[in-house]
Amino acid sequence: MIIRLKKYVGIMAFFALLATLAGCGSSGGGDDREATASRGVISGFGSIYVNGRKYETDQAQFDVDDGPGDEDDLRIGMVVTVVGYSDDRGHHADKIYYDNELKGPVSSIAIDLADATRKTLTILGQAVLVTADTTIDDDGALTYDTIAIGDVLEVSGYAGDSQLIATHIELQDNDDEIEIKGVIENLAANRFEINGFPIDFDGSTEIDDDIATLENGLFVEVEGHLDVLGTTLIAREIESEDDDLMDDADEVEIEGTISEYNPTNQTFMLQGQFVDARFAELEPATLVLANGLLVEVEGELIAGVLVADEVELEDDH
């Protein structure tokens, strides 16, 4: 299953602005700036902590599920992207983006017989791993033990080789708001598939202006409702998705699971971002890179490539 990072309107111009600010900083008063970005799990608030780093949010704008939001819309365990800058006073968030990876009803549940703290849900044909580390909505309406077939869940998490690793799930009360992301496959006149799940569309479907034409291989997000059998998503809206986080930034952190690993070139994909790890320090030093490993990568984005300074194995989400 392929899952990519969310496209954010204007993000390229935003980073160009940050680069300009970084080049214009003076040497005193904390004005020297470096453009930064971080994508990972929220681990705390009081400002916001992502990938273990604190970002001040006093001046931050929040984009939550493709619309304006605020810090109260976020939860520990959600995967977010923080765009901002660092100076000698610390790290500062200018924009914080959250978008779920999947939203739909649970159609099956399989408990790991070797480890009862792990269960695999099927949602819109996608395998979703839920573990004891997965945070669950904090209003008490859902717990790990009470997840049931038919529950409509919003899922935030990371893409594994064959499943979505859930870092946060929430129970939804509206089964008319169903969402899936992925690459268009088997495109026909009024239908295509995402990871094997059928999507129907017609003249009433709103298609993103950035999409010149629907075609196989295009990465999209589809929103809509299920048919009466619950086996096909009737698309209300189809939006385009970008593969890359940005083109250039001085300081970048991304946490996720390795995919498309090339041992010869020491390159891989991480949350849709191409990573060059040839010159990276590995932590621990005995780490052997492989598909499916949960890691945190730090480095610099150069012409759209994350040149890694460090690749660290993560024990949990």
Image (cartoon, grey):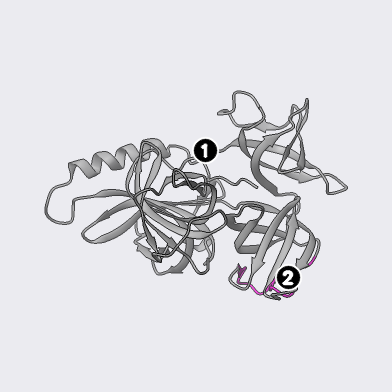
In the image, what residue occupies the spot 47% across and 38% down?
9
Q: Residues within 10 Å of mark 1 (few under 14, many from 20)?
A: some
List x then y, in percent, for residue 246.
Answer: 41, 40
Q: Is residue 139 magenta?
A: yes
Out of 106 and 117, give the one closest to the viewer. 117
What secondary structure is found at the residue carrying circle 2? loop
Q: Quadrant of residue 292?
A: bottom right
Amino acid found under the numbered disc labelled 2: Asp
Out of 44 and 215, give the one closest to the viewer. 215
Out of 312 and 92, give the one closest to the viewer. 312
Q: Is residue 59 above or below residue 131?
A: above
Disc on res. 305: none
| Magenta: main secondary structure | loop
Disc on res. 242: 1
List x then y, in percent, for residue 158.
Answer: 57, 56
Residue that numbered label 2 is attached to: 112
Amino acid found under the numbered disc labelled 1: Asp
Q: Quadrant of residue 17?
A: top left
What secondary structure is found at the residue carrying circle 1? loop
Which residues make up the magenta segment? Answer: 135-148
Q: Is residue 141 above or below residue 24?
A: below
In the image, what residue occupies the spot 75% across and 73% down?
113
Q: Earlier in the sequence, mark 2 or mark 1?
A: 2
The mark tally for this picture is: 2
